[in-house]
Image (cartoon, grey):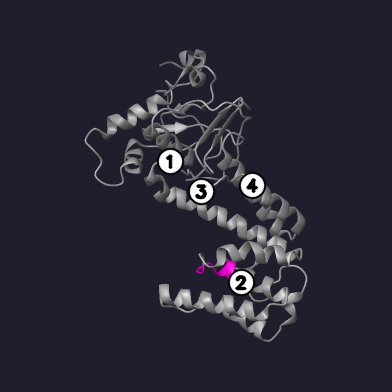
Amino acid sequence: MSTARTAARPRATVRTAPLPPEPYPPTGRGAGRPAVREPRSGRTELNLLGPLEVLHRGHRPHLGSRRVRTVLGYLLLHSNEAVSPDELTAALWPEDAPLTAPRMVSGAVSALHSAPPAVRTGVPLPAARPGDRRGWLLEAAPHEVDLLRFRRQAARGERQLADRDWPGAALTLRRALDLWRGDVLAGLAPECAHWPESDAVREERWAARLAAVTADLALGRNHDVVRELMVHAEEQPLRPRLTALLMVALYRVGRQVDALGVYHRAREAVVRRTGLQPGRELRLLQQAVLTHDPVLLGPGLPVSAAFPGSGRGPGS
């Protein structure tokens, strides 16, 4: 198909031309490159931070079968990156792919270009193009995909946190977290929950959540931090940064015994699951709580003394 014919179509389809330089930043492999041109449309939203959702002018076009929606979800996780047929096959069938898998994968991708008229004529899906290593590429502008918007805001919030702009960091990071409507690609095929890419996005959410809590704690919102982190502490005992933030918040609201209890429960979980002791930073923080170290009530990042060399507090 020639470039001229492609440009003349009302909606871009799979092309045979070589992949040009990426106009939008990828969401995963090689992420971080800035966009080099303005997005072509502000009418589309492709959401995967929760149930898969495609919005076009306020409407939700029908996307077809579960396989088609699963393929779209995987392509969205790799927005602006070439995805090979082998990768898509492995994503759809983690074990024992059928002999007809290549044909089914190709058919599912094609279905994204031959959907009902509301999709085909309304142009709600970014263009899919063959990648430079034979595959498909779902091209999306930063404003079209909630994951891209989340990453952009979370990165800005992390920079504000590093600059000790606590109010700005708290506001920016909370806005980023508000983009989440549930688990990534919730309700889609069961295998989606176990994709490494899905796990990586969940970890990004945790990093943003703990960064937001760090900013809140620096602002003295201790009771809010206690309420938020108590929900997660029992199910996430292996996150040292979460444990540290909760210990400091509990200490600041006059609950020294509870702060030490959080440490001991985390220590038991770490020993039971890994056979190791908690890291040096948490042990130092426990000692600070035991000795009523005044640094725990000081301004700024309250865990910086227990976690030396960290501009943001303990690791995630």
Q: Give the residue displayed 58% in from the left and 63% down from the top.
A: 231
* Residues drawn in magenta: 237-244
The image shows residue 74 at horizontal and vertical percentages of: 43, 39
How far apart are the alpha carbons under marks 1 and 4? 21 Å
Residue 244, numbered label: 2
Q: What's under tag 3, amino acid-wise?
A: Asp
Q: Secondary structure at mark 4?
A: loop
Q: Which residue is mark 4?
A: 178
Please tell me whether mark 3 or mark 2 is closer to you in this view: 3
How far apart are the alpha carbons under marks 3 and 2? 25 Å
> Who is closer to the viewer here, 168 or 18?
168
Q: Which residue is mark 1?
A: 188
Q: Are marks 2 and 4 in contact (CB under 8 Å)?
A: no
Q: What's under tag 4, amino acid-wise?
A: Asp
Q: Are marks 1 and 4 in contact (CB under 8 Å)?
A: no
Q: Secondary structure at mark 3?
A: loop
Counting residues from the start of the chain, the first of labels 2 and 4 encountered is 4
How far apart are the alpha carbons under marks 1 and 2? 35 Å
Residue 274, numbered label: none
How far apart are the alpha carbons under marks 2 and 4? 24 Å
Q: Secondary structure at mark 2?
A: helix
Q: Which residue is mark 3?
A: 183
Q: Is residue 249 above or below residue 179?
A: below
